[in-house]
Amino acid sequence: MAPNYSRLEMMVVAASRLLCASERVIVGTGIPLVAAILAKKTHARDMVMVMEAVAFDSDPESLPFCVADPRAVYRTTWTPTSAEVMGHFLQSGKIDVGFLGGAQVDRYGNLNSTCIGDYWQPRKRFEGSGGASDIASLAKRTIIIMNHEKRRFVDRVDYVTSPGWKCRALDWKSDVMRAEVGLDGGPHAVVSTLGVMKFDESSREMYVETYYDDLGVTVEDIRRMTEFDIDLSRARPMKPPTAEELTVLREKVDPEGIYMRY
């Protein structure tokens, strides 16, 4: 029997499972917000969800379509400014998890949301960092979520918008481990439409932890859709979504299919 859920739904469920009830999680709009709300409405009800521009510890009844949507402040205890969120909480080390997306990611978790091609003459320019560089630099751990394509999982990102484990030195002439430029934290996982990748404790290079076997994904699919040589030796099948996870996602988190495209 074919599974009754999509790769997009599996990706959101897999990302939500990485969040814990005891954590403060900073999110923007889009798929990261969907995953965070799903976690808060299932296994992580005490998780403090901080939206970058508008709400502290909110519990939205319906899905906000942007970071300034008034629906985001439903049941919130405080509506801080961006300066208060990024300054008071993030820079003082009070954010446990940062949820990020981007156009490119490399083997060390460097993330590019700035441009494709040369910075001065790009083939395509994106909206840029927003708060993503701050979040990747200052959160205790970061989770990246994105479509798994060869053009996105690259050997070297065209521009380091958000630093990973091994990033550009301050002189921009070499690559160094993030601790050498004074950064704590670091990427915890990359959740994609094919599986969940983690980072080796020693080399800090990406490896495949789980893949969506129930949806027909194989480790060879991940190898084929990744530009760099990725470690597959630790890969195991991902547990499918539970009935509760799918029901909450479809009926309570995004029933209109704003981001999930049912």
Image (cartoon, rainbow, N blue to C red):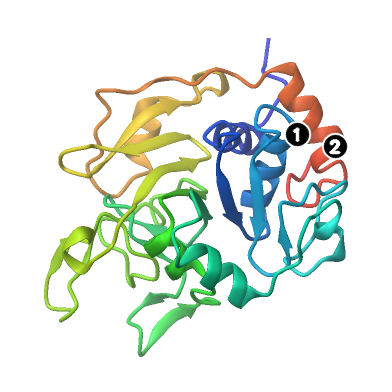
- Which residue: 37% across, 88% down? 121
Identify whether 82 is placed above or below 57: below
Give percent across and percent down for residue 70. Answer: 86, 65
Quadrant for the N terminus, please: top right
Give percent across and percent down for residue 134. Answer: 44, 69
Left or right of 11? Residue 69 is: right
Give percent across and percent down for residue 135. Answer: 46, 63
Please state which of residues 172 and 95 is positioned toward the viewer in this rendering: 95
Left or right of 202? Residue 73 is: right
Label 2: how many Cα within 10 Å (few below 14, some 14–19, many 20+) = some
Identify whether 210 is placed above or below 36: above
Distance (Cα) linking label 1 and label 2: 9 Å
Please state which of residues 166 and 116 is positioned toward the viewer in this rendering: 166
Tally of marks = 2
Q: Tell me the amino acid under the disc marked 1.
A: Lys
- Which residue: 64% across, 22% down? 241
Q: Quadrant of residue 243?
A: top right
- Which residue: 40% across, 33% down? 221
Disc 1 element: helix
Between discs 1 and 2, the one toward the N terminus: 1
Disc 1 marks which residue? 41
Q: Quadrant of residue 53?
A: bottom right
Marks 2 and 1: in contact by CB < 8 Å? Answer: yes
Instruction: Name the mark on residue 252.
Output: 2
Quadrant for the C terminus, please: top right
Left or right of 162? Residue 240 is: right
